[in-house]
Image (spheres, helix red, strand yellow):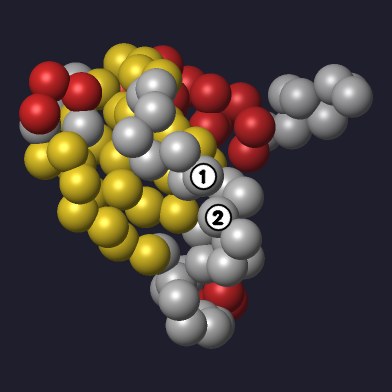
Amino acid sequence: MTDHDHREGQGKHLMGADGPGGLAVAWRKSSYSNHQSACVEVGAIGRELIGFRDSKDPEGAVLTFERTAVRAFVAAVAAGEFTEVR
């Protein structure tokens, strides 16, 4: 993986792989991820689902959530709703 300018919104690392049910998924991880594969990857699964998997175990379990739930979660994080959670 190469270094990226994070300020420009670049650096998403794309990987083609099969997702649940054999669906093709372009898995992405943050450009802030290191080379030790200690990160979460995310990918669209069809039109309705977003999948999350552990980059250390790409053949392992994939957690799936409806797209609307992921949007709501991201909006809540951006709004600071989880700043007190520790």
Mark carried by residue 37: 2
Crowd around label 2: few <14 · some 14–19 · many ≥20 (10 Å)? some
Residue at position x 57%, y 74% from top? 6
Q: Nearer the viewer, residue 75 or 26?
A: 26
Is any atom of residue 82 visible in this view?
A: yes
Residue 23 at x, y percent in the picture: 10, 31
Is any atom of residue 68 visible in this view?
A: no
Left or right: 38 in relation to 58: right
Q: What element carries label 1?
A: loop
Please state which amino acid type lies under the numbered disc 1.
Lys
Left or right: 38 in relation to 47: right
Say if mark 1 contacts mark 2, CB within 8 Å: yes
- Cα distance in 3D space between marks 1 and 2: 5 Å
Residue 69 at x, y percent in the picture: 41, 16
Residue 59 in the image: above or below residue 86:
below
Residue 62 in the image: above or below residue 55:
above
Residue at the spot of label 1: 56
Left or right: 77 in relation to 1: right
Q: How many numbered discs?
A: 2
* Quadrant in the picture for the C terminus: top right
Q: In which quarter of the image is residue 45?
A: top left
